[in-house]
Image: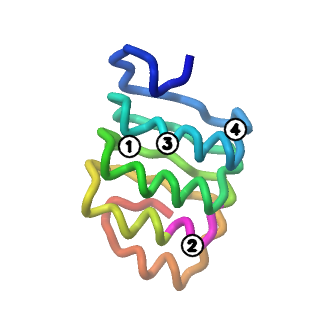
Amino acid sequence: MALAECKTRLTELFLGFNEIGELGGMALAGALPNTHITMLHLSGNHLGDQAAKDLAEALPNSYVTCLHAFNNNIQNFGALELAKVLPDTFLVNLQLLSNRIDKATQQKMTSGRLFI
């Protein structure tokens, strides 16, 4: 059964280091707005920029307050996509440690809610 079809009140989902990859991250992003998940742990899954972009598009329509996405090969593009939607989300904690985000991009991401 797909996550979006589950009739559950699941609020925390820990999928860290499961190698779900870019396609898995994109699929999860598509299901996210149909869930009650507030804490999403996706670290170490090789998500990349496209999955980060898809997550960014899904976050404003979700209940996620905490997203751990460290060590996912997210680069400048994906990080900036996530940063752009922050004002429209419930996020209070976004962790992007150990990704491939350069200093210039880090400086553009000025929200106090980011840990890069």
Q: Residues within 10 Å of mark 1 (few under 14, many from 20)?
A: some
Alpha carbons under labels 1 and 4: distance apart: 19 Å
For label 3, the residue is 30
For label 4, the residue is 20
Q: Which mark is residue 66?
A: 1
Q: Residues within 10 Å of mark 2 (few under 14, many from 20)?
A: some
* Rendered location of residue 99, percent (x, y): 63, 61
Discs 3/4, front: 3
* Rendered location of residue 113, percent (x, y): 33, 59
Q: Marks 4 and 1: in contact by CB < 8 Å? A: no
For label 2, the residue is 77
Asked whether residue 109 is drawn in magenta, I would say no
* Mark 1 residue element: strand
For badge 3, the amino acid type reads Gly
Foreground of the two, 93 or 52: 52
For badge 1, the amino acid type reads Cys
For badge 4, the amino acid type reads Ile
* Mark 3 residue element: helix
Seen from this angle, which residue lies furthest bottom? 104
Q: Which residues are magenta?
A: 74-79
